[in-house]
Amino acid sequence: MTVIPFSSAFKGRKGDGDKHTLKTAAGMFAKKGYYRTTVDEIARALGVAKGTIYYHFKNKEELYLAVIQEGINLLEERLRQAASGSVSRREKVERMIGSLLAFIEREKDLVFLFLKELCGSDLQREVLAKMLSGCLLIIRNVIEEGMEDGTFREIDPETAARSLFGMTTISALHYISYSRSIPHDKVRGTIEQIFFRGSANPDF
């Protein structure tokens, strides 16, 4: 199943731009849930005719997945920016952790939608996993480069990438689930220590 980016269906409409359109739809789904949110409500919130939505998306599920796909596209873009430039592999990892924390805090509705469906429902779980693969590949590539230049020890890069992503994501969700601000320095510093040095005392 090919999922088109959500905002591309509404190019040229009057309003506050793609970001506002995406946030509006994601916020409604996050507040009411997939099954209780109707296409009519989404159309009214976006200020478009219901037929406009069905012109681009054949049903609510396709619309919903398109919203999530756009969120993942945004995250992938942020991670790619963090992993770019002529800096050390360690610094790239540090930047990716910070970028991921910031994204989750800013786009919490999108993140909740994605994780809810990925972990707990039958709504195109395989499609959702494929959406995330691009983000994980960026992290994995940096880890593999670090293994090649000696920055990191020889470990399974795929597992390491998923572990870093999961550790950062769950740490951030702990705070935003209770409507608290993420203490970025504290969370990032702890994750970096665990990832770069491990958590066990060498004496034990």
Image (cartoon, rainbow, N blue to C red):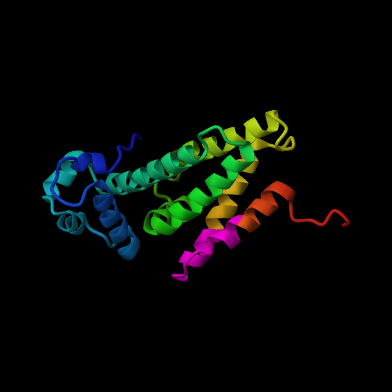
Which of the image's four quarters has the C terminus? bottom right
| Part of the protein shown in magenta | 171-188
Q: Residue furthest front?
A: 86
Residue 58 drawn at (x, y percent): 22, 41
Which residue sits furthest top? 148
Q: Is residue 147 above or below residue 183?
A: above
Question: Which residue is nearer to you in this view: 82 or 21?
Answer: 82
Q: On the image, which quarter does residue 145 sit in? A: top right
User: Which residue shows up at 52% across the image and 36% down it?
Assistant: 138
Give left or right: position of 45 versus 102: left
Choose between 44 and 154: the one closer to the eye.
Answer: 154
Which of 80 and 127 lies nearest the eye of the viewer?
80
| As drawn, 141 above or below 42 | above
Residue 179's image quarter? bottom left
Q: Residue at x 53, y 60 (%)?
A: 184
Residue plotted at (28% across, 49% down): 19
Can residue 116 be seen here? no
Indicate the position of residue 67 as horizontal and vertical percent values. Answer: 32, 48
The answer to whether 116 appears left or right of 156 in the picture is: left
Q: Is residue 142 above or below residue 182?
A: above
Residue 179 belongs to the span the image colors magenta: yes
Residue in the picture at 60% in, 42% down = 91
On the rendered image, what quadrant is the N terminus found in? top left
Q: Can the viewer see residue 73 in this picture?
A: yes
Residue 189 sits in quarter: bottom right
Residue 52 x/y as whole percent: 14, 44
- Residue 127 located left or right of residue 94: left
Left or right: where 41 falls relative to 61: left
* 7 in magenta: no
- In terms of secondary structure, what is the magenta stretch mainly? helix
